[in-house]
Image (cartoon, rainbow, N blue to C red):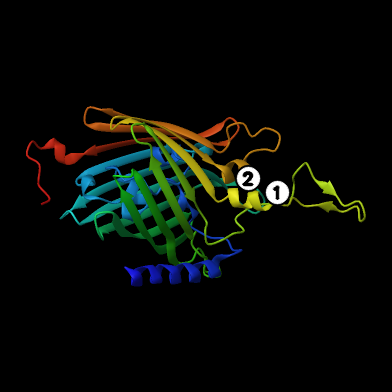
C-alpha cells in the first residue's frame, strides 16, 4: 500500500507541473454522468451505494453490491446540448468488481459556410467516452480502483483520440458513518491530433479529495469536495468586469484581483443529502467556482446551486438533477438504474 501511495504522489507531481497555466482538450471527460452527481454540485466521489454511475466518477466506488446493475442517464444541457451515459457492473467475487461504461456527447448541428460567409451546408460535432473500471478491496474499509478510458472526438472532418486513466481510493467506516476518497483523474495522452499541424494537447487532469459524514439517527449527510488540488491558480479573472478600480496615480484601470479566501473557495464544492430511505433521497449542492465565474455580477440568482431527488419505484431507482449555470438557464439530468439480477427469481451468489 505504501508503494501505491508513493506512485500516486509521483504521478500527481509530474502531471501537475506539466499542466499549470495550460489548456486542455477532451474537457467532456470532466462532465458529470448522472442526475445524482448533477444534484450534488457536479463532483461526488464518496457515494458508496449500489448505483453503477458512481463508479464512472471514482473507480474505488465500484463494489459487489452493483453486481449485474445497469444505469442509464440522459441530460438536456445548456443550449440544447444532449448527453447520454450507460454503465453496467459485474463482479466475479466479493473482493473485486468491474464497471463497463460509455458516454455520448451530442452538440447538435452547425451551419457550414465558405470564406465569404455563404451557407453551404451543415456539420455535426460529437464526443465519446468508453470506460472500463476495476476495483479491489484492500481491507474491510479501504478500496482502490482504476478506470481505463478511450476518448474519441469528431468535429466535422477533424478527429482526435486519446487514452486516460483514473486512479482512486476510498475509505468507508460504516460504524462512524464516514467516507473519504481521493481521485487522480484523466491522466493520459492524446494519440491522434485534430490536425497534422495542430499541437499535441494535454487532457483535463484533475486531483480531487472528498469527505462525507452522515449524522446518526438523522437523514442528513454532508459532503465537502475539493477539486483541482494540483493547481492553486484555478480562477478565471474577468477582465471585462464592470466594477473596476482606477489607479489614481496613473489613471490605468486595474484588473480584477482575488484574495486568498476567494481563490481557496473556487476549489470547493458543498453538498447535502437527506437520505430518508433507500427509495427516497433529496439532494442539494453548491459549486462556488461555477457561481463566481458563470453568473453575471449584478444578478447571479441560482447560478452555482443544484438540487435533485431520487425515488425508488418498484424495481427501478429514478433520479432527477438540476444545476444552475446562468440565471434562468439550468441543466436537467434524468437517470434510471436497476438490478438486473432481480429479474431472475434465483439469484447468483458471489460467494
Choose between 192 and 285: the one closer to the eye.
285
Q: Is residue 341 left or right of residue 25?
A: left
Q: Is residue 209 left or right of residue 264?
A: left
- Residue at point 39% right, 49% down? 45
Choose between 120 and 156: the one closer to the eye.
156
Mark 2 Cα within 10 Å, few/some/many (few <14, many 20+)?
A: some
Q: Position of residue 147 (x, y in %)?
A: 34, 59
Total marks drawn? 2
- Identify the image quadrant of residue 324: top right
Residue 293's tag is 2
Residue 238's tag is 1
Residue 7's tag is none
Give the residue furthest to the right: 249
Q: Is residue 257 visible?
A: yes
Mark 1 Cα within 10 Å, few/some/many (few <14, many 20+)?
A: few
Choose between 131 and 289: the one closer to the eye.
289
- Residue at point 39% right, 51% down? 180
Q: Position of residue 321 (x, y in %)?
A: 43, 34
Q: Position of residue 176 (x, y in %)?
A: 33, 45
Disc 2, disc 1: CB below 8 Å? yes
Choose between 294 and 272: the one closer to the eye.
272
- Residue at point 65% right, 54% down? 115
Give the residue furthest to the left: 346
**Which sits earlier in the primary sequence, circle 2 or circle 1?**
1
The secondary element bearing badge 1 is classed as: loop
Q: Is residue 156 visible?
A: no
The secondary element bearing badge 2 is classed as: helix
253 vs 2: above or below? above
Amino acid at each position: 500500500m505504501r508503494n501505491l501511495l508513493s506512485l500516486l504522489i509521483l504521478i500527481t507531481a509530474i502531471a501537475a507541473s506539466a499542466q499549470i497555466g495550460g489548456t486542455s482538450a477532451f474537457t467532456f471527460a470532466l462532465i458529470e454522468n448522472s442526475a445524482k452527481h448533477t444534484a450534488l454540485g457536479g463532483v461526488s466521489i464518496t457515494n458508496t451505494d449500489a448505483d453503477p454511475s458512481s463508479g464512472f466518477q471514482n473507480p474505488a466506488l465500484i463494489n459487489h453490491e452493483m453486481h449485474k446493475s445497469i444505469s442509464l442517464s440522459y441530460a438536456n444541457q445548456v443550449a440544447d446540448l444532449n448527453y447520454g451515459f450507460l454503465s453496467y457492473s459485474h463482479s466475479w467475487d466479493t473482493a473485486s468488481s468491474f464497471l463497463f461504461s460509455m458516454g455520448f456527447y451530442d452538440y447538435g448541428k452547425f451551419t457550414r459556410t465558405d470564406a465569404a460567409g455563404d451557407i453551404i451546408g451543415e456539420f455535426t460535432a460529437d464526443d465519446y467516452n468508453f470506460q472500463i473500471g476495476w476495483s479491489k478491496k484492500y481491507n474491510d474499509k479501504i478500496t482502490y480502483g482504476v478506470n481505463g478510458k478511450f476518448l474519441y472526438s469528431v468535429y466535422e472532418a477533424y478527429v482526435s483520440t486519446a487514452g486516460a486513466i483514473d486512479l482512486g481510493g476510498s475509505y468507508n467506516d460504516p460504524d462512524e458513518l464516514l467516507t473519504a476518497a481521493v481521485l487522480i483523474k484523466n491522466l493520459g495522452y492524446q494519440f491522434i491530433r485534430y490536425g497534422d499541424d495542430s499541437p499535441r494537447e494535454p487532457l483535463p487532469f484533475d486531483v480531487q479529495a472528498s469527505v462525507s459524514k452522515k449524522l446518526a439517527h438523522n437523514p442528513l449527510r454532508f459532503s465537502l469536495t475539493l477539486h483541482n488540488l494540483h493547481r492553486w491558480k484555478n480562477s478565471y479573472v474577468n477582465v471585462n468586469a464592470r466594477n473596476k478600480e482606477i489607479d489614481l496615480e496613473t489613471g490605468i484601470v486595474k484588473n480584477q484581483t482575488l484574495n486568498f479566501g476567494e481563490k481557496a473557495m473556487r476549489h470547493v464544492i458543498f453538498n447535502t443529502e437527506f437520505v430518508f430511505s433507500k427509495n427516497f433521497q433529496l439532494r442539494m449542492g453548491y459549486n462556488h467556482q461555477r457561481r463566481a465565474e458563470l453568473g453575471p455580477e449584478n444578478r447571479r440568482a441560482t447560478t452555482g446551486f443544484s438540487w435533485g431527488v431520487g425515488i425508488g419505484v418498484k424495481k427501478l431507482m429514478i433520479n432527477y438533477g438540476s444545476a444552475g449555470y446562468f440565471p434562468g438557464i439550468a441543466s436537467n439530468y434524468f437517470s434510471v438504474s436497476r438490478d438486473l439480477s432481480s429479474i431472475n427469481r434465483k439469484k447468483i451468489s458471489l460467494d
